[in-house]
Image (cartoon, grey):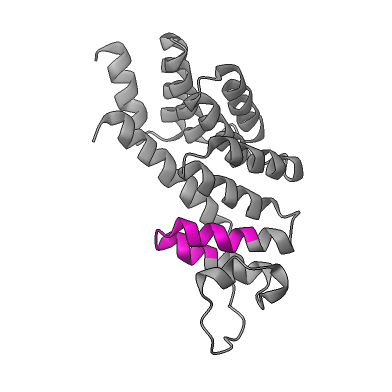
């Protein structure tokens, strides 16, 4: 596995952790005794006995089981029942991003950001898509916005450093990696990036 793949894996793990950090401990409604099959999960809202919260909980379980298709089906149904919930929109966007459907993911991220403008994780996630697609100005704007919300998150500085490397602004990137290390001295990936850029 290449260093880039490891970094992307680490970033994905971070976002996944943050997604589930927002989850409340909820109990599913009483089971009716009938299993809900895939077609029922994707059926019209009127046929589902589950609340949006219970559907999100089911989506979380499916995601943890690495069944993104089922997780997305549950989240879409939850969104149909509670269309102004930024956490649901964020989770849908994140799974779409994992499936490399960047344009659709951005649509949901934008909707989530409209409802929750002070969410640094939405800004970070959007920046990662824009960076991947070499839309550096947009990526920089969202990373800057994330830092305005929370300037103590080492991941944001690390992501900013990666963006600056892509923009061939190595000296500025080193400064970002150093800021990440000031906050978290054990941030191994930031140390490795500095070593790559400085040769020591």
Residue 185, quarter of the rendered image: top left
Residue 120, quarter of the rendered image: top right
Residue 74 magenta-highlighted: yes
Residue 157 visible from this viewpoint: yes
Residue located 37% across and 28% down the image: 190
Q: Quadrant of the C terminus?
A: top left
Residue 176, percent from left and from top = 47, 21
Q: Residue furthest bottom?
A: 33
Residue 184 versus residue 54 in the image, above or below: above
**Left or right: residue 56 compared with residue 113:** left
Residue 102, percent from left and from top = 54, 36
**Left or right: residue 141 compared with residue 131:** right
Residue located 51% across and 82% down the image: 35
Residue 70 versus residue 98 in the image, above or below: below
Majority SS type along the magenta span: helix
Which stretch is magenta?
59-76
Q: Front-most of 69 and 10? A: 69
Task: Please give the count of numbered marks on the rendered protein.
Answer: 0
Q: Front-most of 87 and 172? A: 87
Q: Front-most of 114 and 164? A: 114
Q: Quadrant of the N terminus?
A: top left
Residue 113, percent from left and from top = 70, 40
């Amino acid at each position: 596995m290449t260093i880039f793949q490891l970094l992307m894996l680490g970033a994905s793990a971070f976002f996944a952790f943050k997604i589930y950090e927002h989850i409340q401990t909820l109990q599913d409604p009483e089971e009716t005794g009938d299993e809900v099959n895939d077609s029922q999960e994707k059926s019209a809202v009127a046929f589902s006995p589950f609340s949006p919260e219970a559907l999100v909980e089911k989506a979380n379980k499916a995601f943890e089981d690495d069944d993104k298709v089922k997780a997305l089906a549950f989240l879409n149904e939850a969104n149909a029942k509670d269309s102004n919930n930024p956490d649901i929109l964020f989770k849908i966007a994140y799974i779409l991003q994992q499936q490399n459907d960047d344009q659709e993911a951005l649509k949901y991220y934008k909707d989530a950001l409209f409802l929750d403008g002070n969410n640094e994780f939405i800004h970070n996630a959007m920046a990662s898509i824009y960076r991947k697609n070499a839309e550096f100005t947009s990526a920089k704007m969202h990373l800057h916005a994330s830092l305005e919300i929370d300037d103590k998150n080492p991941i944001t500085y690390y992501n900013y450093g990666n963006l600056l490397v892509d923009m061939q602004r190595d000296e500025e990137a080193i400064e970002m990696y150093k800021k990440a290390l000031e906050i978290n001295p054990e941030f191994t990936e930031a140390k490795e990036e500095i070593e790559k850029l400085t040769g020591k």
